[in-house]
Image (cartoon, rainbow, N blue to C red):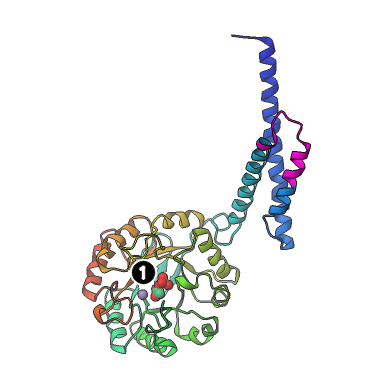
Amino acid sequence: MSDETLSALRGQIDNLNFKILELYNERARVALQIAQRKKELGYPGYDPVREGEMIERLLAANKGPFDDLSIGRLFKELFKNTLELMESHQSQALLSSRRVHPQDTIFNLNGAPLGGANFTILAGPCSLETPQQIEEVAAFLAQRGLKIMRGGAFKPRTSPYSFQGLGLEGLKLFHQIAKRYHLAVLSEIDDPRTVEEAYPYLDMFQIGARNMYNYPLLREVGRQDKPILLKRHFAATLEEFLLSAEYLLQAGARQIVLCERGIRTFERWTRNTLDLSAVPLLQRQSHLPVVVDISHAVGRRDLLLPLARAARAVGAQGLMLELHPQPQFARSDSQQQLDLQAGAQLLENLKEYGPLS
Ligand code: PEP
Ligand code: MN
């Protein structure tokens, strides 16, 4: 079937398509230049007022045959696509991004490698409670060749009437005992004013989930030179999580580990919902190591083994696990802490997949 008029008109349509394509991309390149200039000037990226004005001017100039509704729809779609392009360029320019730093961040803490193909265990009690409790867990970890011990001295509790932790004295005690067992000390700091006094007693700073949005704390902890474990807030998107990491990076920190610890959903049979897809998504976007805290994710002992296996299978670079010599008497999170025997079984089980560090 051929008709000369039809072929000529189709030829015109093809030419117009290519012109639109060219203009569409040309417009995007100009929009990216605008975004860059706005960034230099410290202006916000998205400007809804200007967007509204552009639509108004376009509608005033519209001579048809398309009506205002379709022209409005078309340009809104075009603006949306441009905004997405600008945002994706911005996120690729972040210090946490693989675009900026293609290689995995790998570092060594007290002989334990963090990042890359390693699977590193960060275990210990929820709260530091007594010298004996700290000692028993420290001995357990050291016997198994593990190098890092966690334990909370400053406890961010939901109720102000719950046990708030032993504070700086607890941290000093932790440090003293951990050093006897050649273990690195990992503990949460929740106040920028405490960073300096806690610094000598810590080997790795933990930023807890609740403090992921505490930007003054992120800036202060990011300025010191020890590694940092940053936990995801239970209502944070992955984008917000990486932007919190960006505060640490911007302040100068480089040895940062991201920790997925479950997010809040409608499900009540677990304390939170473990977002396993966060692991490969974060690893795709960022060069920083990603570990999974199974204890706070589910809040119950009986699910820890399958979730530890799942974390390993999905490619996490380590695991956080709460251990207590007598979980039934723990002053916080007693439902989720494993006793040392169950902890030993879980760690043995995980060795099936390869060595633990
Ligand atoms: C913790 O790891 O001690 C803790 C309180 O966890 P999160 O900040 O994830 O709630
Ligand atoms: Mn806990």
The magenta stretch spans residue 63:
yes
For the point 71% across and 49% down, the residue is: 52
Position of the N terminus by quadrant: top right
Placement of 338 over or under 355, stated as above or below: below
User: Residue 232: percent from the left, percent from the top?
Assistant: 46, 66
Position of the C terminus by quadrant: bottom left
User: Residue 281: percent from the left, percent from the top?
Assistant: 46, 54
Residue at image mark 1: 296
- Say which amino acid is labelled 1: His
Instruction: Please give left or right for residue 339 compared with residue 296 in the image.
Output: left
For the point 55% across and 63% down, the residue is: 243
User: Ligand 2 falls in which quarter?
Assistant: bottom left
Q: Quadrant of residue 47?
A: bottom right
User: Residue 24: percent from the left, percent from the top?
Assistant: 68, 38
Instruction: Please give left or right for residue 164 compared with residue 238 in the image.
Output: left
Instruction: Please give left or right for residue 151 compared with residue 60 in the image.
Output: left
Placement of 299 over or under 47, stated as above or below: below
User: Cβ(mark 1) to ligand 1 < 8 Å?
Assistant: yes
**Closer to us: 116 or 349:** 349
Residue 6 shows in this picture: yes
User: Residue 94: percent from the left, percent from the top?
Assistant: 59, 59
For the point 28% across and 88% down, the residue is: 132
Q: Which residues are magenta?
A: 54-69
**Closer to us: 52 or 118:** 52
- Mark 1, other Cα within 10 Å: few <14 / some 14–19 / many ≥20: many
Q: Secondary structure at mark 1?
A: helix
Q: What is the count of numbered marks?
A: 1
Magenta stretch, overall SS:
helix
Q: Quadrant of residue 259?
A: bottom left
